[in-house]
Amino acid sequence: MKDSEIKFKYIYGPVPSRRLGKSLGVDLLPFKICSYDCIYCQLGKTKEKTILRKEYVPTSEVLKEIKRKISEKCEMDFITFAGSGEPTLHKNLKELILGIKEMTKTPVAVLTNGSLFYLKEVSDALINADVVIPSLDAGSKKSFLKVNRPSPSVDFDKMCEGLINFSKIFKGSFLLEIMIVKGLNDSEEEIEKISSLANQMKIEKIQLNTVVRPPAELFAKPVSEEELNGLKKYFNAKVEIIGSVEKIIEASLSLPGKDLENRIVELTKRRPVTLEDISAGLSVKIAEAAKAVTNLLNKKEIKEQIKESKSYYIGNSKE
Ligand code: SF4
């Protein structure tokens, strides 16, 4: 079997990312291990809620796969730690970031829930990345428990202090994502609390988001784009609204050597996608995407989930 035909276990894509262009995803945890169990999580409910840092997947294997992908010379804008859980739970995150830096100049991004920045080992690892995108969805312990449903070992004040301190020493791009959930963290009082924390951080950009994709809990509802726009005034940093469906796909994707159905399966394994997402993300006509999706549904390789009259397709491995 040729190298290019060997499947990857720990990396995926490059996939179109709303924030990072063509992003090669690196998944450091088995599905789904996280320090939170957010009500809006598009991956569904957390199976193992923990703050235990360990080598969940073999570091050397992950680096080998990244090296192999780089040697295929496919175009990518970022190598991004994201995927099936919280990447800072992998205890060799620093070694992984530094290992990538030795192989390529492609910048490294880390999408994280921000829960463990207060740990020196975590901030020592993240400091080596080029872009760090943590989340902060609550301004008080009460809403933190409701929206993020953290592991009991995550202390709200320590979590916030960790984020604030890291933002001040980090030399790369620090983007803060805030997910607004209708009726839970969208009151003026709560937004003022969130903004007073965010305003203590050194932030390149705040990304205001809302529940667009099918969430873990049906009661997690979105706010309107107008409401998101109305929240901009509370923050000192530049604010970008990324909640609307239309903005989700920014980049086109080319994965030579893989047929359309495989590429769709790869996309749906990572997040729920619409036909429009597939069409824009994989540069194919909607009709072509629809035909491949129908085949995959018949073969039960993906499943359909309807949210607000819109169909989303999800990889069956996410059950
Ligand atoms: S949204 Fe992120 S932080 Fe929240 S449960 Fe899902 S993977 Fe964990």
Image: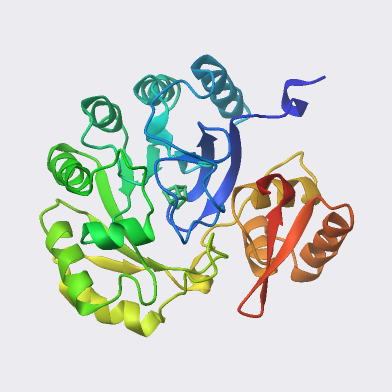
Give x and y (percent) for residue 197: 15, 58
Residue in the picture at 54% in, 51% down: 45
Residue sitting at the far bottom: 226
Q: Which of 279 and 297 is in front in this view?
A: 297
| Quadrant holding the N terminus | top right
Residue 236 visible to an observer of this rendering = yes
Residue 87 relative to residue 126: left or right: right
Quadrant location of residue 180? Answer: bottom left
Q: Does residue 213 lie above or below 58 as drawn?
A: below
Q: Which of 248 and 317 is in front in this view?
A: 317
Q: Which of 306 and 140 is in front in this view?
A: 140
Residue 138 visible to an observer of this rendering = no
Residue 243 relative to residue 301: left or right: left
Residue in the picture at 52% in, 73% down: 246
Give x and y (percent) for residue 56: 50, 24
Residue in the picture at 28% in, 37% down: 116
Give x and y (percent) for residue 202: 14, 51
Residue 199 relative to residue 284: left or right: left
Residue in the picture at 36% in, 77% down: 183
Q: Nearer the viewer, residue 129 or 179?
A: 179
Q: Does residue 91 lie above or below 36 as drawn?
A: above
Q: How many marks?
A: 0
In this picture the colour scheme is rainbow
Q: Does residue 76 lie above or below 241 as drawn?
A: above
Give x and y (percent) for residue 208: 33, 66
Residue 301 relative to residue 105: left or right: right
Residue sitting at the far top: 60
